[in-house]
Amino acid sequence: MQDNHSTDTRHANILQAAAALAKSELEHEGSGHDWWHIYRVTELAKRIAAAEQANLFICELAALLHDLADEKLVDDPEAGMKRTENWMLENGVTAEETAHVMEIISTLSFKGGAGKPMTTLEGAVVQDADRLDAIGAIGIARTFVYSGKKGRPMYDPNIPVRQEMTPEEYRNGKDTAINHFHEKLLKLKDLLNTDSGRRIAEQRHTFMEEFLKRFDREWNGIDGL
Ligand code: ADP
Ligand code: NI
C-alpha cells in the first residue's frame, strides 16, 4: 500500500502525462473535439467532482482521455480503446483505476453509450461535463463550426426538425445548425445526472433559448425598431 504523499505524486504525474497525450493527439482535430474541448470538459469535471464529492483523480483522468477513441476521430474505436487502456497501465495507473476510467469512457462514447446510464458517480460527473460543453455560448459556437465543416447551412426554414433518427441519419442526414438545437441541444439539460451539473446547465440553457429567439427575430427582420 502506498502512502498518501506518493499516491498524490503518482496521480499528479499521470494527469500531466494524460494532458500531454490528449494535447498531442487532438491538437489538429476539426470536428469540435479538439484539445480545448478536452480542457473545458476537464475543468468542469474537476469543479463538479469537488461539489459532488466524487473521486477527483478518476474524474480528471477520464475527462482527459474521454475522446481519444471516439468513432469520429479514429477509424477503429475498439483499437483506440485498447490503446487508451494500455497507455494507462504503462503509465502507472492501477488496474482498478484503469478499469474504472475505461468503464466511463466506453459508456460515454456515442456508439457504446447510446442511452446507457452511467454506473458510477465519477461517470455521472464526466458525462455531465461533456454534455455541458455542448450547450451555452460554447455550445452555440461549436454547433456553427460543426455545421460549417459539414457544409450545412446555418438555417433553412424548408428543412424540418427531425423527431426521430437513426445514428446514420444523425451523422449524415439533411440538417442545419439551428435544427441541431431542437434535435439535441435543448434536450441536454434534462439528461444531466448531478445537481451541480443541472445548476450550470440552467443558465447555459436559458442563454441558448434567448439566442434562438433573437436569431428568429433577426431572420424575419422583426427585431429592434
Ligand atoms: P459527442 O461526441 O459528445 O456525441 P457530437 O459529436 O454529437 O458530440 O458533437 C460535437 C459537437 O458538434 C457538439 O458541440 C455538437 O453540438 C456539434 N454537433 C454534432 N452534431 C451536429 C449537427 N448535426 N449539427 C450541428 N452541430 C453538431
Ligand atoms: Ni467530448
Image: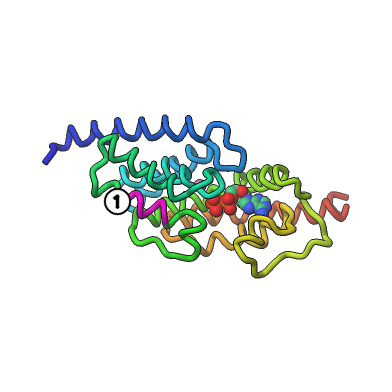
Q: Amino acid at mark 1?
A: Ala
Instruction: Name the residue rendered at 39%, 61% in the picture.
Output: 118
Q: Main secondary structure of the magenta part?
A: helix
Visible in this render: residue 204?
no
Assign a secondary structure to mark 1: helix
Instruction: Name the residue rendered at 53%, 55% in the picture.
Output: 201
Instruction: Give 186 or 10, whichever is nearer the viewer.
Output: 10
Instruction: Give 224 or 145, whichever is nearer the viewer.
Output: 145
Where residue 184 appears, x then y in whole percent? 62, 60
Instruction: Give 68 or 39, whichever is nearer the viewer.
Output: 68
Count the labels in the image.
1
Where residue 159 appears, x then y in whole percent? 79, 61
Residue denoted by label 1: 99
Instruction: Name the residue rendered at 57%, 36% in the picture.
Output: 29
Q: How is the image coloured?
A: rainbow
As drawn, the residue found furthest toward the left would be 1
Q: Is residue 223 left or right of residue 94?
A: right
Mark 1 close to ligand 2, CB under 8 Å:
no
- Quadrant into which the N terminus falls: top left
Where residue 90 appears, x then y in whole percent? 28, 36
- Is 70 placed above or below 187 here? above
Where residue 38 appears, x then y in whole percent? 48, 40
- Is 193 placed above or below 144 here? below
Visible in this render: residue 2?
yes
As drawn, the residue found furthest toward the bottom would be 164
Q: Is residue 37 left or right of residue 105?
A: right
Q: Which residues are drawn in magenta?
A: 99-106
Residue 216 among those drawn in magenta: no
Mark 1: few/some/many CA within 10 Å (<14, 14-19, 20+): some
